Image (cartoon, coloured by chain):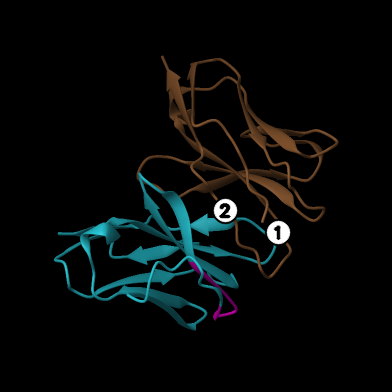
Amino acid sequence: LAKTTQPISMDSYEGQEVNITCSHNNIATNDYITWYQQFPSQGPRFIIQGYKTKVTNEVASLFIPADRKSSTLSLPRVSLSDTAVYYCLVGDRGSTLGRLYFGRGTQLTVWP
Amino acid sequence: DAGVIQSPRHEVTEMGQEVTLRCKPISGHNSLFWYRQTMMRGLELLIYFNNNVPIDDSGMPEDRFSAKMPNASFSTLKIQPSEPRDSAVYFCASRLQGYEQYFGPGTRLTVT
């Protein structure tokens, strides 16, 4: 099971772009990279998933270099409501043995 | 779609008492996960089921913890006897094979 490393915390101001980088040196060929977001007093929520290059949805973009040993979650023009913990996970989404390791995540705090 | 339903939302009990947490996954999902979250240890996977069968219970802390999934629409996590160190937020999540996990609102357990 590939383990991930990400910063414990980050600070930003409203309107700025935030990039959170995650290292996953032992990623396997079949592994996908998934990011979850958790607000206080709520369960984590899926925000984006990718395998290689770039993925974009209405919430965020995910950049994955060719070697796939890291990935970067990009949040454009953050607002106060983006304050949350962001988890980077790596796993084989198609496997029956589909457990994911959440780790401690990155606490993003957005200031006015 | 009601999402993942957990009950109770809050539970306060005395040390030594039995605690039962309940979860109803999203209809049609074939995997179910139980997590525990604390400030010290973050979000930890306790056990997960695939098609009602326990696949990996290596995260269950000790014999005081047990989980069952008698059918596709119901699961329980039981702690007997409970101890103060079991105080945490317990999340249930469900997943359709190969896609993201959907988390419930959690049960906040306090053991005094």
Q: Quadrant of residue A15?
A: top right
Quadrant hosting residue B98: bottom right
Q: What residue is shown at x 60% (from left), y 73% (from top)?
A: B30
Q: Measured along the vertical axis of the image, is residue B6 above or below residue B39?
A: below
From the rendered image, report the letter of the chain displayed in brown.
A
Q: Position of residue A46 (x, y in %)?
A: 58, 47
Q: Are marks 1 and 2 in contact (CB under 8 Å)?
A: no
Write the start and end of the magenta stretch as one range. Answer: B47-54
Q: Provide the residue designation for mark 2.
A: A101
> Residue at coordinates 51% horizontally, 69% vertically from top-left?
B58
Q: Residue furthest bottom?
A: B70
Q: What colour is chain B? A: cyan
- Judging depth in this view, the residue of A107 and A6 nearest the camera is A6
Name the disc covering residue A93, or none.
1
In the foreground, B60 or A52: B60
Q: Secondary structure at mark 1?
A: loop
Query: Mark 2 — on which chain does it sit?
Result: A
